[in-house]
Image (cartoon, rainbow, N blue to C red):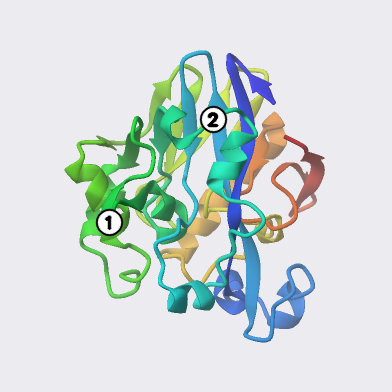
Amino acid sequence: MKIADYHIHAIETGTFALDGGAMFGIVPKPIWSKKIPADDENRIVMALRCMLIMSNNRNILVDTGIGNKFSEKYSKIYKIDHNKVNIESSLKKHGLTNKDITDVILTHLHFDHAGGATCFRDGDLTPSFPNATYYVQKENLDLAENPTEKDIGSYRKENFEPLKKAGKLEIIKGESEIFPNIFLFISNGHTLGLQHVKVSDGKNCVVYCADLIPTASHLPIPYIMGYDLSPLIVIEEKKKLLNNAAEEDWMLFLEHDPYVGVIKVRKSEKVFEIKEKIEL
């Protein structure tokens, strides 16, 4: 996919699993399990899909996957699987290594989005992309450094403290055009200061949905996660994004959907549904 001067690719970094009930909140299991079946521990498998934005002088990565720092115990709990694909093998398909990434935009610092931002190298925690500048919203970093009891398990300091120590973390305050034709806009329902990436040239547009719409199965407005900090805010933010996407024919990049990476949507009466699946 080409938008403006950028070539955009889906970067698969593996899969993991979370409790299906937590992923669909108030929606009963007999309904959500028809969309994404659960295993015998009630977990659903989800993608860890990042977006690569390539130009002549930049290789920009949006989110980093879950990384490989979890212990064996927690790797089993979250069913982390890098056997078929990982971030290095996916970058290699585009002729890149970790050293070629110039910028990393972190939508937020939950472990399944920022876990791959750091890694162990010679026994020390260090940035996974040594030549990149990492970008995060100040409001989200503040929460990550002082998490509530509800989300203390999602914000792990080993995913961002090494970036600060290395002088690689740039703090963004609010919405902006971070690079030409690449815009950041904010949602606060899932967590504070979640920054979405929108690449647009006025004709074509793709939006990285992150956890506002984690999968295509979450298109129905009431299908929101138990992980969301402010469910009513999520509902309003979803309505706004989906209405814009339907009216302006935006492409929506889905980070966690195990079956489809990019879609266009339409509004049928009061229901949003997939209009088209896009191959990258």
- The C terminus is located in which quarter? top right
Q: CA distance from mark 1 to mark 2?
A: 24 Å
Residue 80 at least partly seen: yes
Task: Specify whether residue 207 is in view.
Answer: no
* Quadrant location, the N terminus: top right
Q: Is residue 237 above or below residue 180?
A: below
Q: Check the image and report above or below for 214 versus 227.
A: above
Between label 1 and label 2, give the one nearer the viewer: 1
Q: Position of residue 22 (x, y in %)?
A: 54, 75
Q: Residue 123's mark?
A: 1
Quick one: 98 or 239, which is closer to the camera?
98
Q: Residue at x 37, y 66 (%)?
A: 154
Q: Quadrant of residue 137?
A: top left
Q: Disc 2 marks which residue? A: 96
* Quarter of the rendering containing residue 149: bottom left
The residue located at (61%, 71%) in the rendering is 24
The percent coordinates of residue 49 (x first, y second) are: 59, 48
The amino acid beneath tag 1 is: Gly
Which of the marked residues, 1 or 2, is nearer the chain's N terminus? 2
Q: Residues within 10 Å of mark 2 (few under 14, many from 20)?
A: some
Element class at badge 2: loop
Residue type, numbered disc 2: Leu
On screen, residue 172 versus residue 26, left or right, reads left
Q: Position of residue 111 (x, y in %)?
A: 41, 60
Q: Is 30 situated left or right of 177 in this image?
A: right
Left or right: where 26 falls relative to 75: right
Q: Nearer the viewer, residue 100 or 122?
A: 122
Is residue 216 toward the left or the right of residue 98 in the image?
A: right
Label count reads 2
Residue 152 spot, x, y in % from top left: 30, 70
Residue 130 quadrant = top left
* Crowd class of label 1 (few under 14; some 14 to 19; many from 20; radius 10 Å): few
